[in-house]
Image (cartoon, helix red, strand yellow):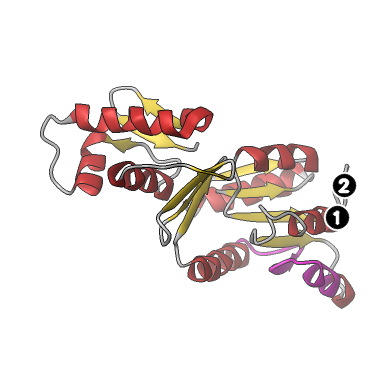
Amino acid sequence: MIYIVEDDKNIRELECYALESSGYSVKSFETSSDFYAACIEQLPDLVLLDIMLPDEDGLDILRNLRNQEKTKDLPIIMITAKSTELDKVKGLDSGADDYITKPFGIMELISRVKALLRRTNQANNSNIFSFGNITLDAERHRVTVEGERCELTFKEFELLKYLLQNQGIVLSRERIMEQVWGFDFQGESRTVDMHIKTLRQKLGLSGKLIKTVRNVGYKIGD
């Protein structure tokens, strides 16, 4: 998921179209307040952040994100009309991972996004997955909900990990059975359904983040 914070409607729509055409899930925001509210619900994988915004300067947003434990490592690309060397240095020194000046080429934008996500994935080593208040550490085999430890069985853990690895994707019961249990689905829908039920119970209020898609299966995320 990529978040765009940009008050210019034309640029915002252009960025959304380019990213969605490249296969990314995107949400866009005109103000910092809407962006912050969305981050509480779900942290993005990357943020495209304009500097000149109506309610809060982009550099202030950047510094705020870097000062919060939950968002301090969030990949951020600044996109702005400010193109002097001093502006770029200020943005990078404030914590931006990359800096693109307007006007920019769509191919360059997509290339920069892919490069940053690739570096981030390599750094994270794909061991930690999160959505909402749920965090799963695959290496330590640990799940926390709102910072509190959540004890899961092995299959519940693997089921949650598979859902988090595929955020926003509807996973059929057949696919879940094959990937989590390791054998072809043969009418064992009750196995998947019962594990989803107990997983939701153990996750408490955050269990509502696991959505049932009628006649298909389950998903977590938009």
The residues bearing labels 1 and 2 have C-alpha atoms spaced at a distance of 7 Å
Report helix, strand or loop for mark 1. Answer: helix
Q: Which residue is mark 1?
A: 60
Tell me the number on the disc at residue 185. Answer: none
Amino acid type shown at disc 1: Asp
Q: Is residue 32 left or right of residue 108?
A: right
Tell me the number on the disc at residue 56. Answer: 2
In the rendered image, is residue 209 in sight? no
Q: Residue at x 33, y 22 (%)?
A: 214
Magenta residue check for 105: yes
Q: Residue at x 46, y 42 (%)?
A: 150
Return the residue found at the far bottom. 85
Q: Residue at x 21, y 26 (%)?
A: 190
How many neighbours does mark 1 have within 10 angstroms: few (below 14), some (14-19), or many (20 or more)?
few
Can you give x and y, in whole percent of width and height, for residue 33 in the image? 79, 38
Q: Is residue 179 left or right of residue 208?
A: left
Amino acid type shown at disc 2: Glu
In the rendered image, is residue 61 in sight? yes
Report helix, strand or loop for mark 2. Answer: loop
Numbered disc total: 2
Q: Is 122 located above or below residue 204 in the figure? A: below
Query: Which is nearer the eye, 212 or 199?
Result: 199
Q: Is 91 located above or below residue 135 in the figure? A: below
Q: Is residue 80 left or right of residue 123?
A: right
The part of the chain drawn in magenta is 88-106
